[in-house]
Amino acid sequence: MKNLALIYPNKFKGGISCLAMHVLYHHLNKYKDIRCDMYFLENYSQIKNKDAIVITLQYENDYFNIVKIIEKLRINNPKAIFIGGGPCSIANPLPLSNFFDAFVIGEIEDSSIMYYLINGERDLKGVYYPEYHGRNREDFKKIKRIYPKRLGIVDYPIVQFTHHSGAYGKAFLLEIGRGCPRRCKFCMAKGIYYPPRFRRLEDLTYLVDEGLKYTEADKVALIAPSVGDYRHILELCQYIRENHNIPISPSSLRADTVSEELLEILDIKTLTIAPEAGSERLRNYIGKDISLEDIERVLEIAKISNIDSIKLYYMVGLPTEEREDIEEIINLSKSIKREFRRVSISINPFIPKPCTEFEKEPFNMESKNNIRYIEKSLRGYGIKVSYENFNSMVVQCVLCRGDASLGNLIREYSKPNQFLKYLKKAGLLSKYLGPWNND
């Protein structure tokens, strides 16, 4: 019997809403000679005498937690193999390559790769072994990503753990698709989960029927990079409502995929849309392809549907951005506020991520001033403005582009601000924030 620990390297409320945790837990426990337990930041210190420790890499800023976790667990788990996986592993695992024994590069459904890896097999397709392959970018790039050609019901977690503190509340997580058919040049989903795949309607209705039978849930959360791009989305939502009479929460909706019928079925209180840029020129350049007419149309549908709360997502620091683009964010937000009682905007700097068309672009440090300018310009208009800590975004950019040399720095400077302070002092920031050469 192999004893495993599956770790989400942050708080429970984030991990319980992470579909990858449920997929891995279900997948690993299906083997009779494997026992897998789930852990989070709050309880990982209990882990002892495991044969393997699997950590999902969902966000770069979790790397500081991950290094602390591994350093501590290697003491009480001397024989364990440490395995990483998830979107950050697919995009660039190099900053953590000194800490893990292996990284799974891709998706594990409909595959026995995890079983063989845990049982000590080497030379597996889709697995990056830093010690064996090397820790340079060209070494990692030789590993071919693995993924199922079709998403079905194999390995889907019917029984899920839920909690009211989760991002979706006590929801059954229903992944309708993976990968994205759109052409946004800034988004990793297109690159790391290519090709876009959607589940068949009959598979989804089966999963929701079985899932709500065995999972304690008071809603269904639809998971996909763009839920509205699923051609059977209306039929699926109608089925859930008619057969289960339970609220439905979409992870994301594009403005050009929203219909009056869909909003009526979803019964949402706040409509969230992501123009990303203020001007149509810049939206077209970054591949967002949402016109002002699309935005006006969806806002009109929202009014008809008695939705009085709108949330908007923007980025600043995008390639070719000009002052007029910043002003258009302000103007668009103000014009929407004139029509709706509650308007909030989330605005953050563009981060040039690996596996995107914009991966070689520089990070724009002027974004900090532009965020402040937008916030100041909207003061007094009743628009709530939120944004992430700017230094945290800078650290994220460094880590997503980083190499193996960052590993020791993450260990030595165990807090993001300490890490960033050292990089500035050592004159290393420009190496990671300037135009990127990842060849």
Image (spheres, grey):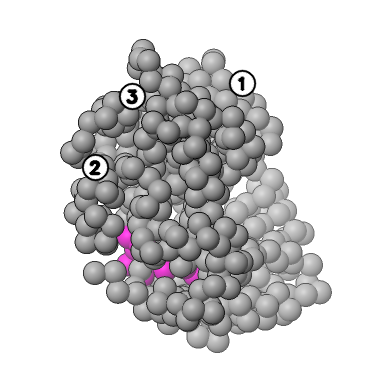
Magenta run includes residue 354: yes
Q: Mark 3 vs mark 2: which is more N-terminal? A: 2
Asked if residue 123 is positioned above or below residue 225 in the image, the reply reads above
Extreme bottom residue here? 323
Q: Are marks 3 and 2 in contact (CB under 8 Å)?
A: no
Determine which residue is flagged by label 2.
126
- Where residue 189 sits in the image (x, y, percent)? 38, 53
Magenta run includes residue 174: no
Determine which residue is flagged by label 1.
216
| Residue count near mark 2 (Cα–Cα under 10 Å), binned few <14, some 14–19, many ≥20 | many
Asked if residue 438 is positioned above or below residue 155 in the image, the reply reads below
Q: Secondary structure at mark 2?
A: loop
Tag in front: 1 or 2: 2
Residue at the spot x=40%, y=32% of the render?
A: 80
Q: Mark 1 vs mark 3: which is more N-terminal? A: 3
Residue at the spot x=29%, y=26% of the render?
A: 119
Determine which residue is flagged by label 3.
154
Relative to 190, is 313 on the left or the right? right
Residue range highlighted in magenta: 349-358
Residue at the spot x=64%, y=26% of the render?
A: 218
Residue at the spot x=71%, y=54% of the render?
A: 309
Extreme right residue here? 380
Task: Decide if residue 202 is in sight here.
Answer: no
- Where residue 230 sits in the image (x, y, percent)? 40, 42
Asked if residue 194 is positioned above or below residue 359 in the image, the reply reads above
Q: Are marks 1 and 3 in contact (CB under 8 Å)?
A: no
Q: Nearer the viewer, residue 46 or 391?
A: 46
